[in-house]
Amino acid sequence: MHPLVTRRHARPRRALAALLALAAAACLGLVSGAPAPERAPEARPQPVARADARTAHTVSYDRHSLIVDGERVLLQGAEFHYFRLPSPDTWRDVLEKYKAAGFNTVSLYFHWGYHSPKRGVYDFSGVRDVDRLLDVVEDVGLYAVVRPGPYINAETSGGGLPAWLKTVEGRARSSDAGYTAAYREWLTEINRIIVPHQVTRGGPVVLYNVENEYAQNTDAQYMQDLQDLAHAQGVDVPVTHNQCCQASWTPHWAEGLGAVDIPGLDDYPQSFECQNADTVWGPWGDGITRRLKADAPVYAAEYQGGAIDLNNAGYEACRKLTGPAYMKYFYKSNLIRSGATLFSYYMGFGGTNWGYLAQPNDVYTSYDYGAMITEDRQLTEKYDEFKLQSHFLRAAAGQLAKTDEAAAPASDNPALETAARVNPDTGARFTLLRHADPPATTDDSAVLDYGDGRTLPVRLDGRDAKVLLSDYAFGGQRLALSSSELMTHTSAGGRDVALLYGREGEAGRTVLEYGSRPGVEVLDGAADVSYAREGDALTLDYVHEDLTRVRITGGGRPPLLLLLGTDATAAEFWQDAESGLLVRGTALLRDGAVRGGTALLRADTERAGEVEVFTGAGRLAVNGDRVPVRRTASGSLLGSLPGPRAVEPPELTGWRAAAEAPEARPDFDDSRWRAADRTLHADDHGFHHGSLWYRGRFTATGAETGLKLNAITGRRGIYQVWADGRYLGSAQGGVQADSDPPVNEDPGPGAFTLPDTAPGEEVVVAVLVQNMGHNDDWIADDTRFKQPRGLVRAELPGSAADIAWRIQGTRGGEDLADTERGPFNNGGLYGERHGWHLPQAPASGDWRRSRPDVEGGTVTWYRTSFRLGLPHGQDTALALRFGEPPAGHRLLMYVNGWNVGQYGAGIGPQRDFTLPAGLLRDDGRNTVALAVVAEDDSAVRLPSLVVKGNHRTG
Ligand code: IPT
């Protein structure tokens, strides 16, 4: 039997759910953990991994799906990166938004380098508290797929590998001894946290993923070792892997040494060409996840939910590239054509590459990803589309989790094609309708022939796809056919409610089976109703407009309220996953339940408006406040809710500025800096992130014709050079080079003119290098990942003089001075080393009223503070807004000491920088500090505060 684990915190919300779950489980005979019969598919599906912290569950799988406590489960998940949201309080907000979209799963990368500043040192506190993260996941009621790597890619520095690993012998992502010893440290630490959170111990963790797209330079022993270690350390949920880019990439890790239980595939059919969002359509394949293993379910481990902005088009373009039309066509095609029952969309919310989290070749500060939830935690039209599709998956999961390919109704128009799956136990059929020519944008109609005398007129206008149901039972009803799509259904107050939808203005037909002619009342909108005794078919014909409401009673079935909406009106609905409560209105339903005749909602509003609850209960309370209601003709409760109070962000004024960079001056005392005699590479000296200073001394021969330097910064990086305090200029740093020229020689093209030197004269050269982050290790051969950072070569053409170098970086190096903000927050600028970025007033520096211009070859800090008095009970998202990115300088921005971004034309197109809510004092003083690093004379653009979202919230 599985051990019972006593958890530390009492969770009031879960306590009740636990009782209900236990009671339900007892009824179904599932408590023993013994194999149990499958639940009747008509029953409300989807146990969420929630509730009873003390109940151990069983997890298994077959070719169709995962099976938890004998029940089939369909995983509909999205990826979330806690490390890109340095604010544990808002983890809950984002995860509740996942849940409210209809998801039941979150996929989580764990970032080794984020927790480990130094070999042997691990930090899981504060913003790094992933034990708390898994508690929140459980509390919200989601399953978790955990992905601790050790390699995660994810466009983060080093692909998640810690920078100190660059100096460790042995190829990363192999079974080499040096690397093995290193990653065992990490997995031992993270497994210790994960193991007690497994479903088998009453927690939310249902799958454990090893490695990431491990396709090139593979080492099967390493894959096996990762799993052996996990198993030895208590991992007993199925192990998965996500292979890259459809089935053509191998190995699949489906068999042989290193094979996992459930091999999966990543698929990004829409590419990352955000700049061509209007024209691109599936250049990277058909997006159908292939089956990799006969006796395991089909797993879409990462399915494209947005895109990285490789070409600086901005994330709104990426959101467009992966918008609702793409989602309809590709997600629905994949659902029906692949038969997958495990999905994770990458990303659901992207977040922020705060500090030096970015892998610089592919991303800049924002990791918004064009996802369904913006970096500012706001919901988009993609969220609405996910809501429609995910509510459907949740409602139909009992039937969708076990289907086989089946004959599809024939289309009489070759422009439209069909494919279908059937649940073999119930006969419920799911038919995909799409254009035969994938990129077609035409408006086509057809009649589907079901082969049994039944036909159905259908239409597809432009890039679209539909999943149409037939012979589908829910509640006490039987849906024979519909050309509308199902969003969800529920049972409330002794009747069934079903919500169907279609594109605005398109005709719809829904056929329901009744034993005798039922009573039909069109309460709202219009529908033609007919009844045919033959086939016992009640046919409703209507046009999708606004929200049509039809009440059907009698006919030998429980009463049914049929809601027929458009995409937009259906997306106004929410359904609580646990209680099934259906709600229309509000900007977000976080929870809904009925207790003692009162419907209790926890909900957000963006403006004042209606709320309608489909319940037999007579009273309504929202966020703890009673709301006056009336009963509608549809039998629902209707009330109205206030919106948030408007928020005017304070102006940022009173800037003070101070110049720094004394390191550039010849007389600066660098005697306590580390001598860089053995190697210039910053990582060898323990300086892994952000700005690096080098000071070199040589005795001139007088024959020097110049100074040639090479520095490697990663893409978007520069370096600047001074001699005896005189600014010589700047150059672009070296970037990742895959083959030719070899990476370690990839030159920063730096030839500088030295001031005239006299023989015997001592010359001091100072170099400021921006280390933009570490490359990934996608091809698992060390060449990208172990590419050095910092100066890699220095020459004095015409002279044999040696330069003696010293190096300086982040205060403390690997022994972090700031453990709260962690290894990625700071580099080695003078101001950073002396706390000029921190909230408290700097103890050093000559702070004056700020000047609008800076000179090339300077580093200048600007500071101001602002007071917030944000209304209580509201969630207000704030950002720092800059103008057009400047060419002459770049700047680092700190809010309350947290490095929230880098701005400049050489860095990326970003102008608005998200301020994660938890870093701000809602009710008090906040500090902004900017470090302006100027390559050329330029005007400084100081930012303003803007509101990116404002909600009244529960
Ligand atoms: C794939 C990675 O697994 C993931 O970490 C992330 O990098 C994502 O894609 C892109 O954002 S890699 C890709 C080549 C499919």
Image (cartoon, helix red, strand yellow):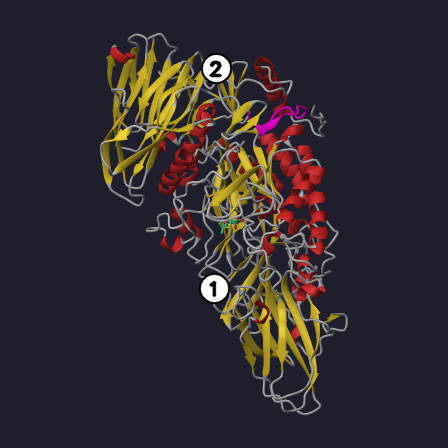
| Residue 38 at x, y percent in the picture | 52, 19
Q: Main secondary structure of the magenta part?
A: loop
The relative height of residue 382 versus residue 179 in the rendered view (above or below) is above
In reply to whether residue 141 is colored magenta, the answer given is no
Tell me which corner region of the image, top left, top right, bottom left or bottom right, holds residue 766: bottom right
What label does residue 432 carry, if any?
Answer: none
> What residue span does the magenta drawing correspond to?
47-60
- For label 2, the SS is loop
| Residue 288 at x, y percent in the picture | 41, 41
In reply to whether residue 56 is colored magenta, the answer given is yes
For the point 47% across and 65% down, the residue is: 886
The relative height of residue 163 versus residue 593 in the rendered view (above or below) is below
For the point 54% across and 51% down, the residue is: 215
Tell me which corner region of the image, top left, top right, bottom left or bottom right, holds residue 672: bottom right
* Amino acid type shown at disc 2: Ala
Counting residues from the N terminus, which is met first, the one under dot 1 or under dot 2? 2
| Residue 449 at x, y percent in the picture | 26, 26
Is label 1 in contact with label 2 (beta carbons under 8 Å)?
Answer: no
For the point 58% across and 26% down, the residue is: 68
Q: Residue furthest front?
A: 256
* Position of residue 114 in the picture relative to residue 43 (left or right): right
Residue 822 shows up from this direction: yes
Q: Residues within 10 Å of mark 2 (few under 14, many from 20)?
A: some
* Amino acid type shown at disc 1: Ala
- For label 1, the SS is loop
Q: CA distance from mark 1 to mark 2?
A: 58 Å
Query: Is the distance from the Cβ of mark 1 to the nearest ligand 1 atom less than 8 Å?
Result: no
Q: Which residue is mark 2?
A: 617
Q: Nearer the viewer, mark 1 or mark 2?
A: 1
The relative height of residue 727 versus residue 120 in the rendered view (above or below) is below
Q: Which residue is mark 1?
A: 905
